[in-house]
Image (cartoon, helix red, strand yellow):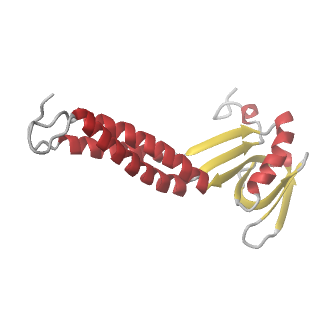
C-alpha cells in the first residue's frame, strides 16, 4: 500500500485514537451489590472494611444524601460518623437505600489499564492504516508504524487514563432498599 509523501492522515488518525482512548476513560468504573435478604448480612463486614479510613456516600430512602466515615452495619441499623466533626449518627437499616464508596487509587489503576488498551489498539490500527512509506533514506512499513504508534498510544492512553480514572475514582455501591418494590416511574401500576 502506497501513500502520498507529506500526507497527514496518520497523524489525524492518531489524534482521533488518543481522543477516543481518553473519552472511553471518562465512563468510570463502578459496581453495585445488592445487600438485601441473606446478602445483607454478608455485606456488613465488607462495608466495614471498605469504609475504614474512607468517606462514603449514604443515601436514605427519603432522599437524604450525606457522607459518613467509620460505617458500622448491624442486622437492623446503620451507624456512622460525619467526616468533619465526627458526630455519631445512626438510622434503621430499612431507611437506607445505598452506601457508595469511591476509591481513587483503584480508579487510577482501572483507567491506566483501559486507557493503555484503547490507546494501544487504536494507535496500532492508525499506524497500520497510514500504510507503507515510499522508498527513501528513512521509510517505515505499515507494520512498523503500527508498532510505533501502538506503543505511543499505550503510553499516552495509559497516562491519560490513569489521570482521569484517578480523578473519577472507582465506585462500589451497596444497595439496601429494594427499588423494584416501588413500581414503575410515575407511580403507575
> What is the number of callouts on the image?
0
Give me the residue at 30% from left, 43% from top: 149
Give me the residue at 38% from left, 41% from top: 120
Position in image of residue 144 (x %, y %): 26, 37
Give me the residue at 54% from left, 56% from top: 166
Looking at the image, the residue that sits furthest to the front is 137
Q: Quadrant of the C terminus?
A: top right
146 sits left or right of 116 in the view = left
143 sits left or right of 32 in the view = left
Position in image of residue 161 (x %, y %): 46, 50
Position in image of residue 43 (x %, y %): 81, 43
* Depth check, front residue: 132 or 138: 138
Q: Quadrant of the N terminus?
A: top left
| Residue 188 figure quarter | top right
| Residue 37 can be seen in this image | no
Q: In the rendered view, tell whether residue 16 sits above or below residue 59.
A: above
* Depth check, front residue: 75 or 181: 75
Looking at the image, the residue that sits furthest to the right is 75
| Residue 182 figure quarter | top right
Give me the residue at 84% from left, 46% from top: 44
| Residue 31 can be seen in this image | yes
177 sits left or right of 173 in the view = right
Amino acid at each position: 500500500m502506497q501513500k502520498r509523501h507529506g500526507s497527514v492522515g496518520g497523524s489525524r488518525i492518531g489524534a482521533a485514537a488518543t481522543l477516543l482512548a481518553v473519552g472511553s476513560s471518562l465512563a468510570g468504573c463502578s459496581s453495585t451489590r445488592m445487600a438485601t435478604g441473606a446478602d445483607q448480612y454478608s455485606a456488613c463486614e465488607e462495608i466495614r472494611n471498605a469504609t475504614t479510613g474512607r468517606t462514603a456516600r449514604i443515601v436514605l430512602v427519603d432522599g437524604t444524601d450525606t457522607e459518613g466515615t467509620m460505617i458500622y452495619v448491624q442486622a437492623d441499623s446503620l451507624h456512622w460518623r460525619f467526616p468533619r466533626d465526627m458526630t455519631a449518627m445512626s438510622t434503621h437499616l430499612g431507611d437506607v437505600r445505598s452506601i457508595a464508596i469511591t476509591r481513587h487509587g483503584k480508579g487510577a489503576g482501572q483507567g491506566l489499564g483501559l486507557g493503555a488498551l484503547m490507546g494501544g489498539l487504536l494507535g496500532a490500527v492508525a499506524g497500520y492504516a497510514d500504510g507503507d512509506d515510499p522508498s527513501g533514506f528513512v521509510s517505515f512499513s505499515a507494520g512498523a508504524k503500527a508498532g510505533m504508534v501502538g506503543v505511543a498510544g499505550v503510553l499516552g492512553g495509559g497516562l491519560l487514563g490513569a489521570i482521569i480514572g484517578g480523578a473519577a475514582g472507582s465506585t462500589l455501591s451497596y444497595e439496601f432498599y429494594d427499588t423494584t418494590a416501588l413500581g414503575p416511574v410515575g407511580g403507575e401500576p
